[in-house]
Structure formats: structure tokens, C-alpha cells
Amino acid sequence: MTTVLIVDDQQLQRYGFRVLLDSIPETEVVGEAANGAEAVRRTAELRPDVVLMDVRMPGMDGIEATRRIAEAGGRSRVLVLTTFDVDEYVHAALRAGASGFLLKDARPDELLAGIRAVAGGDAVIAPALTRRILDEYARHVPVPTGPGDPGDDPRLASLTEREREILVAIGKGWTNGEIAARFVVAESTVKTHVGRVLAKIGARDRVQAVIFAYDRGLARPGVSRP
């Protein structure tokens, strides 16, 4: 059973999400919140698996609420709902610790798949959307001033050669299956490498690992699939 907290300042929107999630046996809506401050408080009280987070709300917005929830270090993961084409805050939400993104006009099956993925610790949701967001995000990331810059980070220095290759692949948006095919290893081996990479660089999930790779110039927009 995946527990969900719905956060949206629009009552009708919250009701729609609740009706959908209550119709699915494996999900349980444990609460609702109408703003960021209430979301932070209710997350601490209810400890849901997933917080379905709107971005634009009066008072504390979804980005600040996401940051506070992530910094609390609890078990709850945040799935941000955004209208990508007009939401200039999406880059800040990535840095704040969001574990995934969906557009507000996502199909019900996409929303449910996203909730399941985030609850399971995976941040690979709606790959086309994720790539669009990250490509747009990367245009705001300063290009490293020299080839030695990324190596200055002790977290990168702690990676083995293969782990660094895995990190670069994650930064390019490759799935575990694509990484396994590229390096001719079992997918279970890739999962082990990914787990070690996340632990060594201090990333909560793959989205944060992608941001880490972008920030250090290991991945840039426009990279083709393997």
C-alpha cells in the first residue's frame, strides 16, 4: 500500500486526485493540504510515502515546502505536479529535492505509474518530460571553466572508473536497461552500481544524480540515446 498526501490550493483539483487514488487498491490518500506550510506540517505528522505537490500556492509555495520536506530527512518523497511550459520554478524544485515530475494534464495511468516509481525510490518518470526539463535546466547551468574543475569534487574522486561511467550515463538520461546494454552487463549489476554512485555522491535518487552530473559538466543537453 502506497500512502499519499495531496497538496494543492485548488479544492477541486485535490478532490479529483483523491477520487482517482481512492479507486486504486494499492494507494491510500492519508491527507490533504492547501498550501506549503500545511504540507510540511502534515508530512511530518502523517509520514506518507509520496507527497503529490503543486508548485504555485499562496504563502509558502511548493518549492520551499519540497526543500523543507527533503531537508527533514524523512521517508516521504515529493512528486511535483507542474505546467512545464509556464513554470519557471521547475529548476529550483529540482534542487529542492523533488523526486519526480508530472504535467498536470498527465493521464491517470501516468500519474499512478509516477507515484509507484517515486514510492519505490525511482525517479525515472515520464522520460520525455524529464529530458525536456533537464535540457531546459542545463541551459541555466554555467559551463565549467576548465577540464580539471569537476575533478576538484572529492565525491567524484571517490568513484571508480566504472561508477563514473555509470554516473555519466545517468546524466544522459539512460535507463538501467540501456546502461546494461551499453556496458554489456546484467541489469542487476547496473542497479548495484547505481546504488553505490548515489551513496557516494550523496544523491537521494536519480534526478539528484542527474543534477550533480549537469553541475559538474559531465552531461549536457542534446545528448543522443545509446
Image (cartoon, rainbow, N blue to C red):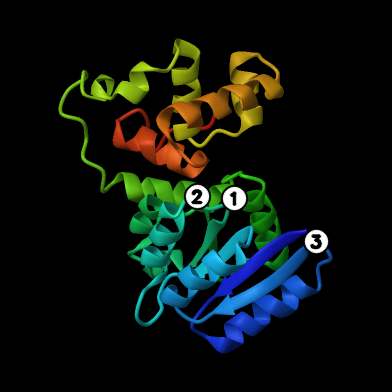
Distance of label 3 from label 1 (alpha carbons): 18 Å
Nearer to the camera, 68 or 187: 68
Q: Give the residue type that dot 3 points to.
A: Glu
Which of marks 2 and 1 precedes in the sequence? 1
| SS for callout 2 | helix
SS class, disc 1:
loop
The answer to whether residue 78 of the structure is visible from this angle is yes
Disc 2 designates what residue? 130
Q: Give whichever of discs 3 and 2 has the lower sequence position.
A: 3
For mark 3, does the 10 Å Cα neighbourhood hold few (<14), some (14 to 19), or many (20 or more) residues?
few
Helix, strand or loop at label 3? It is loop
Q: Earlier in the sequence, mark 3 or mark 1?
A: 3
Which residue matches tag 3?
26
Name the residue beneath numbered marker 1.
Answer: 125
Q: Amino acid at mark 2?
A: Thr
Q: Residue 86: x, y in percent?
A: 38, 69
